[in-house]
Image (spheres, coloured by chain):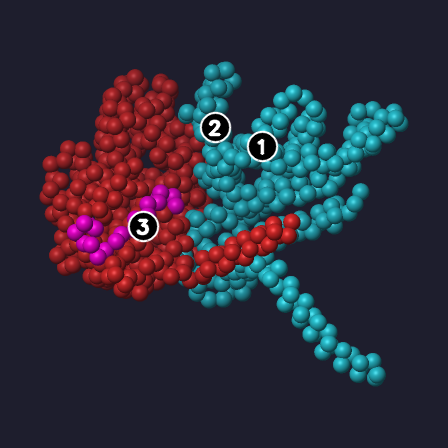
Amino acid sequence: MKRTARTSILALSTASALLLTSCGFSGGGGSQGGEDGVTTLNMLVPTYSTGTKTLWEGVIKDFEAEHEDIDINLEVQSWDNLEGVLKTKLQGNQAPDIYNGGAFAEYAAEGLLAPASDIASDETLADFQQSFADAETYEGTQYALPLIASARALFYNETLMKEAGVEQVPTTWDELYEASKKISEKTKAAGYGMPLGSEEAQGESLIWFAGNGGNFGDAEKISVDTPANIEAAKFMQKMIEGGVTQNDPGATQRTPMLNTFIQGKVGFAYGLPQTAVQIEKENPDLKYGIAPVATKDGSAATLGVADRLMSFKNDGSKSAAVKEFMDYFYSAPVYTKWVSAEGFLPTTKSGSEQLDGDQTLKPFLDLLPNAVFYPTTNPAWNATDGAFKSMMGEIATGKSAEDVLGGIQAKADAASN
Amino acid sequence: MSTAVRDAAAPKYRVRKHDQSWWASLPWIGPALALILAIVVFPAGYMIYNSTRKISQVGTDLESVGLKNFATVFADPALPRILINTFFWVIIVVLLTVVISLALAQFLNKPFPGRTLVRMAVIVPWAASVVMTTTLFYYAMDPNYGLFNKFLVDLGVLEEGFGWTKNAVPAIAVSIVVAVFVSIPFTTYTILAGLQAVPDETLEAAKMDGAGRWRTYFSVILPQLRSALAVSVLINIINVFNNLPILRVMTGSIPGNDADTLMTYIFKVLQFDRRLDLSSALSVVNFAIVLVIVAIYVKTVKPMQEV
């Protein structure tokens, strides 16, 4: 009895000692340039596809073979968790040295990011297409390096269209409504797949808003509840209430919805170049086509997405190593291989030249000039994005379009102050 | 006067003695104390501190705002619905769990062949990860490829798959089923332990006095289960009130706040609005509610009192 008591006290004190040491509140900021001259870079990236992790591991392995004095710790997270993980790291002073994300302005606004000129050479910076480089600028300084670009296009199921007697691929909202209605009524499939769940409600919304000349605002002001956007949201509601979408669009996530499209159970859905790659892999028999986004009057518009690499400066001691990595990664052979493996569009001039003849990418490359982007340079964008994810689905549960967009606007305004 | 003089002299001696026993006990209680301070008191204190700060979306602590965060939280139009949801969620889950567990424990207390196996089987939901169990249910409820929906469609009950987890009320109902399922093992075992402590003499006495089965159960067995029940109800209330994984998986995709309990709402404020300060304020409210429930419970049920 005595012995067990002593052992358990021992165990307890060991445990508490361990706890106290590991619970150090501010943390050490990771390993610095160590005694042996090796710099360790922490890298946090999201998954674009199931192959993302392997792709990055390949890049890092080749890079480390060339640079023996630099080690890279790769951490891969899902998009759902990415920003939560980053936030935890920031609070614990463990900010990643290389970070791949969507929004950057709020981090730049707080002075957490290293300027682009510190993390990439002049040649690398000059290689970015100007429009993309401009989108990485906050108050006159470029902070991030554009990594990928993407555009959405309308995927249509030819088999279902034939079965329902739809002859023309819809180019306007009304045509899309009628075509979806026919498919919903005459086949067992859903007409149009509308994912307004928390995964990417902001994406589906902006595709529709852009189709009416709308957007989410600019670097100075987030504007969600504009007349053009409300009109578009009302049409989305008409689609839902007319029963031409899948069930419960307000709670439908994008990935499962696209999976059902790939299985041939949805007539129309907006997809990415990756969707085409996925169809090729998982259901090559699917008879489908890719067309421009259907808009109110048939004019060209789509949602463009650009993601970026950035570097949290921490104490600034690792900038040189980050620069080595960025210059290596953005060199045409490495970068082009990465971008095309993920099915994205390149943001560098040298990359675009190399990928010019790619057939899968062509319809999307054509759409890119008319793309509307998220206002990622606005520090309130993150909050707006969150508000879309948690609230936009409510247009499917009977709330008025004005109320829903007004609510999102209120959250954006609250974050701007 | 004289007593005052004596008192003034006395503490010296007393303090030294007190000191000694304090130092002597430190090695024994020290580690536990350090553990409690590090993992209970400090985080709770830090949470309360955060609730009075303005914290940027990135996570930088900007300034003190006093109780402004609480004013914002209480002015939130979504709060009443959330509190009502939370109330029903806790009451229904705990009530169902206790009633089912009472029956199950009674059954497991009877000797029958294979009893050990059945007792082991009851533990399974307890041993499995809650997120895993919930995800399993979640997929079964999926309108497109869920097993449960396919079953109902094949039987002809439904024409096509229903989005059980896509609408507020059915999603909470399904969550309740899962919560009861994972709460039963602990509750059953606590009650079973209580049942085994019921002396046979009392049962024999009841028999001698001619009490029927139900009478014996309600007048003899149930009162003796008081402390076992008290413990399991209290722990269940706290657990269910603070449950995040089940609700987050089941109701996570529902837009707006119609299906939120206080706990999932705190999580959404953190995840979507990125308001660490507001979610801390909400957590303090949550903490206070749990404390009040426990206080009321201890006061009225007096679980510590002997029967």
Q: CA distance from mark 1 to mark 3?
A: 39 Å
Q: Identity of the amino acid at label 2?
A: Met
Q: Position of residue A29 (x, y in %)?
A: 36, 60
Find disc 1 in the rendering and name its residue.
B123
Marked residue nearer the N-terminal end (2 or 1) = 1
User: Left or right: A316 with respect to A250?
Assistant: left
Find disc 3 in the rendering and name its residue.
A44
Image point (28%, 42%), residue name: A53
Q: Secondary structure at mark 1?
A: helix
The colour applied to the residues of chain A in this rendering is red
The disc label shown at residue B6, or none: none
For the residues carrying marks 3 and 2, which lies nearer the camera in this image? 3
The disc label shown at residue B141, or none: 2
For the residues carrying marks 1 and 3, which lies nearer the camera in this image? 1
Q: Is residue A192 magenta?
A: no
- Chain at numbered mark 1: B
The span picked out in magenta is A63-81
Q: Identity of the amino acid at label 3?
A: Leu
Q: CA distance from mark 2 to mark 1?
A: 24 Å
Viewer-proximal residue among B131 and B279 = B131
Image point (24%, 24%), residue name: A284
Residue A35: quadrant of the picture: bottom left
Q: Which chain can be seen in cyan? A: B
Q: Identity of the amino acid at label 1?
A: Ile
Q: Secondary structure at mark 2?
A: loop
Neighbourhood count class around disc 1 (C-alpha, 10 Å): few under 14, some 14–19, many 20 upward:
some
